[in-house]
């Protein structure tokens, strides 16, 4: 597992706050009740001494007998306490700590294992910080339909195979996965749709996914290098090199110059060296990529990335015409 570092730190802080808040709320309820029911304070005072009475009993000659006596006295006091609360119209557990998650007591861990509630929180945070949050509701494997490719047998067969391949890839993504893809094809054929679907599944499996358009990626590097947009927030480009899966959408729509070329080269090359998977979506064919990005980038892309060709008729248009 390699959840996004910042998400992880933030969520851990949220958990400590949640934990403390639950305990403070219980303390406040107890203090309130002590004002109203002074006997309760006395009872709680006695109950608080149970542990030390047990310790005392353990060290005595007739330990077993005395431990049992302390235990039964403790149970009697607890019954008395419950009765008292009921008599005043409060639930028996009114002063107990009420955690949001009873499994982990809002610590995020059960023994040394991360609790399911914290895993869920990290996945939700992953959706938000990945950049796919707006798209993920409408672009999943479940609503990826092959019917749009039906008027061409070859397109249909290829798209069926490609969708199945990407689904399998996403569903089996783990810490050893090092496989990159280039989704190549004309506009409106499902590249963004399928890569978003991959992102959702990989995030659900607990990995850090960063989804970005080529233009935004370049803006981030520009802001880091030259200041300007977002510089005040301190643009951190490390996620481009370190995230488990980087998805660069609309590769080729950005302006090309020495700076953008060196950004792409650097990200593509570093991720290769670090064996980190990447998906690049583009409308450009190999020749266009070669002439725009040069040999160093092209040979890495076509050597390391498996090309997946998208065929068919623009699905945006098909959807409009069907209403
Ligand atoms: N197989 C599909 N089933 C259902 N909806 C689809 C399918 N493929 C694409 N769509 C939908 O059609 C629209 C266009 O698809 P998408 O954005 O994935 O195209 P694209 O290949 O990324 O195009 P572009 O190159 O212009 O970015 C989106 O709304 C998407 O959800
Ligand atoms: Mg797209
Ligand atoms: Zn929990």
Image (spheres, rainbow, N blue to C red):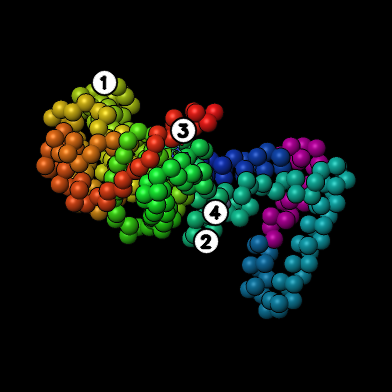
Of labels 2 and 1, earlier in sequence is 2
Of labels 2 and 4, earlier in sequence is 2
Magenta region includes residue 322: no
Nearest the eye: 206 or 109: 206
Secondary structure of the residue carrying tag 1 is loop
Q: Is residue 3 left or right of residue 246?
A: right
Observer-side mark, 2 or 4, equals: 4
Tell me whether circle 4 and circle 3 mark residues in contact (CB < 8 Å).
no
Q: CA distance from mark 2 to mark 1?
A: 46 Å
Q: Residue at x 39, y 36 (%)?
A: 313
Q: CA distance from mark 3 to mark 1?
A: 41 Å
Q: CA distance from mark 3 to mark 2?
A: 53 Å
Q: Residue at x 65, y 73 (%)?
A: 58
Please, is residue 64 above or below residue 21 in the view?
Answer: below
Examine the residues drawn in magenta and state their main secondary structure: helix
Please, is residue 162 above or below residue 192 in the view?
Answer: below
Secondary structure of the residue carrying tag 3 is helix
Q: Which mark is residue 31?
A: none
Residue 126 x %, y %:
44, 42
Q: Which mark is residue 318?
A: 3
Location of mark 4 (residue): 116
Nearest the eye: 90 or 105: 105
State yes or no: Cβ of the residue under disc 4 lies below 8 Å from any atom of ligand 3.
Answer: yes
Tell me whether circle 2 and circle 1 mark residues in contact (CB < 8 Å).
no
Please, is residue 255 above or below residue 53 in the view?
Answer: above
Location of mark 2 (residue): 111
Observer-side mark, 3 or 1, equals: 3
Location of mark 1 (residue): 228
């Amino acid at each position: 597992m390699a959840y996004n570092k910042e998400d992880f730190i933030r969520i851990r802080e949220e958990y400590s706050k949640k934990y403390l808040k639950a305990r403070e709320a219980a303390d406040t309820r107890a203090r309130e009740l002590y004002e109203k029911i002074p006997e309760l304070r006395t009872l709680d005072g006695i109950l608080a001494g149970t542990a030390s009475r047990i310790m005392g009993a353990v060290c005595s000659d007739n330990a077993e007998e005395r431990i049992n006596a302390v235990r039964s006295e403790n149970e009697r006091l607890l019954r008395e306490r419950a009765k008292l609360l009921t008599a005043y119209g409060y639930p028996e557990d009114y002063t107990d700590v009420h955690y949001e998650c009873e499994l982990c007591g809002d610590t995020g861990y059960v023994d040394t294992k991360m609790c399911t509630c914290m895993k869920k929180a990290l996945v939700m945070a992953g959706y938000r910080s990945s950049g796919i949050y707006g798209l993920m509701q409408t672009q999943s494997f479940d609503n990826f339909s092959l019917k749009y490719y039906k008027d061409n047998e070859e397109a249909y067969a290829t798209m069926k195979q490609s969708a199945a391949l990407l689904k399998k890839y996403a569903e089996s993504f783990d810490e050893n996965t090092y496989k990159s893809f280039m989704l190549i094809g004309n506009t409106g054929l499902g590249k963004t749709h399928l890569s978003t679907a991959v992102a959702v599944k990989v995030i659900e499996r607990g990995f850090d996914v960063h989804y970005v358009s080529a233009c935004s990626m370049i803006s981030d590097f520009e802001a880091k290098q030259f200041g300007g947009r977002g510089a005040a927030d301190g643009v951190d480009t490390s996620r481009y090199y370190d995230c488990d899966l980087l998805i660069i959408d609309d590769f080729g729509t950005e302006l090309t110059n020495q700076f953008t070329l060196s950004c792409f080269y650097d990200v593509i090359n570093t991720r290769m060296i670090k064996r980190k998977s990447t998906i690049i979506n583009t409308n450009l064919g190999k020749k266009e990529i070669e002439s725009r990005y040069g040999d160093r980038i092209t040979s890495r892309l076509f050597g390391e990335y498996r090309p997946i060709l998208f065929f068919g008729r623009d699905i945006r248009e098909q959807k409009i015409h069907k209403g």
